[in-house]
Image (cartoon, coloured by chain):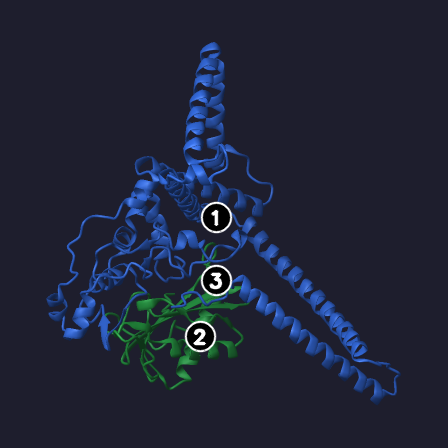
Chain colours: A blue, B green
Amino acid sequence: MGRRCGMGESITEFMDRQKRRAARFGREAEAAAHEAYGKAIRAGQDLKLGSPGDVMRHGVQLLQDAEGRVAKTVLRTVKEADARMGGTMRRVAENPVVRPVAIKAAREAGNVAGVVRGGVHSVQGLVDGAMFASRLANPLDGLTSAPGQSAREQLARGAANAGQMGADYVQKGVADPRIVVTDVTETAKRWRREQDPSATPAAPTFGGELRRNFDIGQNQGELAFDVGSLVVGGPAAKMLKGLPRLSNVGNVDRYLTQGFSAKAATHLAKPYPGSNMGSHFIPRRTRLPDFLGGGPLPKSYSDGVFNVLKPEGISRGDFYELHYEVDPRFHGTGVRGEGWSGKGLGLKRYGPAGRVWHGSPPPLKARISGLGAGAGTIMYGPQNEDTGL
Amino acid sequence: MTLRPDVQFRSGFPDDTVYDDDEDILAWPGRNISETLKAALERLGYRVSEPICMEHAGWELDILHQRKSFNVRISVIGANECYLMADSTKAWFWPDMKGFRMFLADLQRILEGDSRFGVIGWFPRGGSAGATEPADAPFDP
């Protein structure tokens, strides 16, 4: 089933669109030239278009002039919008009550973005690690790799290098302990600059200060994610499948007692397919802020193990119940011509804390227990003008 | 002011679920409703994606309008229990409540102008008829 048919497009779609645009441009150029020719005749002007090539060239010139005018208008509109935005920023910057709120909001937005960034980096690490491990296990890797580049040789070289570097450092430290003290101090300073807003001077402009706080917020978010990695390593997190649950796969009676027909109950008692999309902790529709590109979340994170809740061995019926309990946007679905309604079954939804705990995939829970609560609360916050969306 | 971005409605649209030979679902219901909504929003000047399949959760539309970004999900449980849920999807700094209110007002106009949407009521997120007192508008004037 085509899952993504939205505004993002593949290279093929892009090329097709460009071809269509070129064809349309040709037709428009020809039409513009004919229109100009008609006007010239009516106005008694001398316009010589002796060949189809002349017609096309003249039409292209007309369209390019028009495009130039449009481009100038767009540029002027953008400049006006920038000026208006600048005015808003100045008013916020000058307001002693709103200014700290905006800066705090920037840092908190950075926290969430940092969690995402940490997740993306972690997933990249998992993929790299998995590929490396598969090469290690492949007996033909040594034959198919360039000399000195097999996984075993790389591993041996890396271990040797790391060991040698460590030994060198210890030797230098024994000879001159100030090296170690300086390094530790410098590392601590760098960490403080990256994590503590008070460790670096405020930016000269309000916009710069927002950016500085967002960046520091991001570093804090990623740090929180990485600290979790010390407890549960990357590969271990991927293997973590969650607490054992009572499986209702095959338990048709459970769904018959809920009032479904035998056909629907049988369907609900089947395992929830691993290929299905599951429930997203941070919703797929979430967009990044403009200064981070404004697009959707990276797919590697959005559809990755840290964001998709899809417990193994769960039945379809139980998965729908779990989804209803943790996602306020899921009310129910159709099952073999019958309606599956969370409200109809008398299910209760979790509150914000329950949604974060039960709605987050086990690897994410293990890695960012503290900050995940903050992210989840933002994502599932109440629709209230006082608190934001 | 509390917004009510979710609507429960009765559907006058035909069931467009497609099953395979084993009666597993090939196409989930509600695509036709999403396409109708897409066309109506485009007539109002919105840029709207093709319907995005969310499997058992329904269909979504990503919507752009004057640098504002919205999302709508359509869920069909049965002809008498359907949901439309709207979101503003750029809410990181200062949520654009004014833009979102205008979008909800446009949605309300579209639903009220098409008799196939039998609106039961508007609800805050997570609500539904029976669980929350329904309102006849997405926000109070």
- Could you classify mark 1 by the number of other residues whose Cα lies within 10 Å: few (under 14), some (14-19), or many (20 or more)? many
Q: Earlier in the sequence, mark 2 or mark 3?
A: 3
Tag 3 secondary structure: loop
Q: Secondary structure at mark 2?
A: helix
Name the residue carrying label 2.
B105
Q: Position of residue B58 (x, y in %)?
A: 34, 70
Residue wearing tag 3: B96
Which quadrant of the view contains residue A75?
A: bottom right
Dots 2 and 3 on the same chain: yes
Q: Which residue is mark 1?
A: A106
Q: Is residue A235 above or below residue A162?
A: below
Q: Indicate the quadrant containing the C terminus of chain A: top left, top right, bottom left or bottom right.
A: bottom left
The structure residue drawn at horizontal position 35% and vertical position 41%, both measured from the top left corner, is A234
Q: Is residue A72 left or right of residue A204?
A: right
Report, in whole angstroms, how far the alpha carbon at label 2 lies from the one at label 3.
14 Å
Subunit bearing disc 1: A
Which residue occupies 45% across, 20% down?
A: A164
Establish whether labels 1 and 2 are both on one chain. no
